[in-house]
Amino acid sequence: MIDKREILEAASTLSLLPNVVEKDYVLGWILSGINANPVLANSWVFKGGTCLKKCYFETYRFSEDLDFTLREASHIDQEFLKTQLSEVVRWVADQSGLNLPPDQISIDFYNNPRGKPSCQGKIGYRGPVSPSTGGWPKIKLDLTADEIIVLPSARRPVFHPYSDVPAEGIWANCYAYEEAFAEKVRALGERTRPRDLYDVVNLYRHTDARPSAGVLRNVLKQKCEFKSIGLPTFETLVSHHTDLEAKWAAMLGHQLPVLPPALDFWNALPEIFSWIHTGAEAPQRIIIRPDLQEVPIYSRTLPMSIPIRTRPALETIRFAAANYLCVDLVYENRTRRIEPYSLRRTADGNYLLHAIRSEDGEPRSYRLDRIQGASVTSQSFSPRYVIELTATGPVPVAESTARPRSERTTKRTKRSSGSYGPTYVYRCPNCGKTFERKSMTGQLNPHKNSSGFQCYGGYGTLVRTKY
């Protein structure tokens, strides 16, 4: 188990309460225990807001529950769940050192709105910052066995940014990205909660991962038909606007370092529903200070050459970018309010943050090693350029200048202008087949897998960049 200091430092960096960060830490280990259980690993499909945070977007709102769709209805059983969850917590306790007594497992059964049995489990724990006496903090598991799963599930790595992450990582069997997105739109239409509004808008804003409108609409239609509800539209949500704003802070305030204005998220919905129902795309933004010789570099961890002392500020900047919030940047002993857009690396090894100065709209670049601090403000902005700080996984870092001429291959002169630059290799999350792209577009069409069977494409995972 990690020590208390690591939780407190993370909480300070993220501007969150220590118990919120501790719960995120425990959630990762519970997912690891479920993945290690041969009975549950493939039959429980992870979904919901925590799935988005832990498996798709590291810079996201913190969540508290684990939601699963069970492929086997027989798993909704008191004896079965008690046995399997006891095995999970024993394994996790052995591997992590967390205190997870089996007698702190509770299971409550109920009938869902369709009259089918579902259940809610709770797992008590004590972690690095939990009080040693008093009540036990709980991890809640929502389990249902009669949800429709439209697409093949995806095996995804779990973001566990703590020092005790296993060498092989943590993995989870979860909803495909398109299905997770459609499920959130369905939930927004059916129950209209603030966190669903936050999730839908955030998913739409991640343009690098956005599926085609047709695919999303098809999945959404099947999910709504299964629930016997109509396809949600902006018009069907209008009556809930006042209630959403009233509950915005209470339901989201503790999960985010700074709460964005509810109105900004509400105002994003007309464009989103127009895209879903008609396929109408929003106007495409250009890259801030585009350079034809820039080489994007993606990594699951930040490059080691980024100074440790600047990493907390960078995480703050990433969160602000994802939520369209301005940043007060302390740079060379002065504070500047900026709109953050991109981080790139120069040929001499320096890292530059590209931004817009809020006061006059002027583009500016800031050396990362000279940033003295950063704080998120409540001032929102409408992006003028592509925000490159919100890709799936950790921050993308792009070369700001080309490699020395002596290192370039002469074969480039034989290529067409459209083949200049890097090649991006994406892996299908369902069958493992890889595809090469000249642009950073991970959308994969249906294709034959290595066995000759048809595979639904979905959104591929970037595995490497070839130069």
Image (cartoon, rainbow, N blue to C red):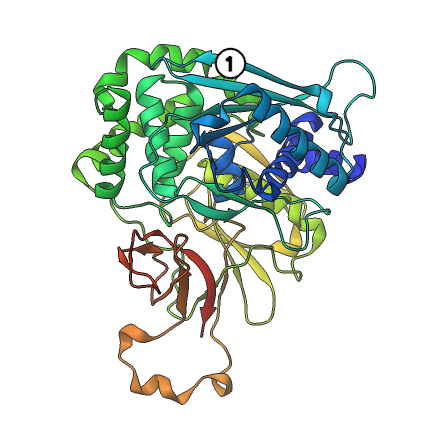
Q: In this view, does 131 lie above or below 182?
A: above
Q: Amino acid type of disc 1?
A: Phe
Q: How many labels does the image show?
A: 1
Q: In this view, does 122 lie to the left or right of 465?
A: right
Estimate the x, y position of residue 306 in percent, counting from the top left: 65, 58
At 73% from the left and 28% from the top, the residue drawn is: 100
Estimate the x, y position of residue 398 in percent, counting from the top left: 49, 62
Outermost residue to the left: 278
At 54% from the left and 37% from the top, the residue drawn is: 40
SS class of the residue under badge 1? strand
In front here: 203 or 85? 85
| Residue linked to disc 1 | 109
Q: For residue 108, which quarter of the picture?
A: top right
Q: Is residue 237 left or right of residue 385?
A: left
The N terminus sits in image quarter: top right
Can the viewer see residue 48 in this picture? no
Can the viewer see residue 231 in this picture? yes
Estimate the x, y position of residue 178 in percent, counting from the top left: 34, 41
Q: In this view, does 305 lie above or below 250?
A: below
Report crowding for label 1: few under 14, some 14 to 19, many 20 or more residues within 10 A (C-alpha).
Answer: some
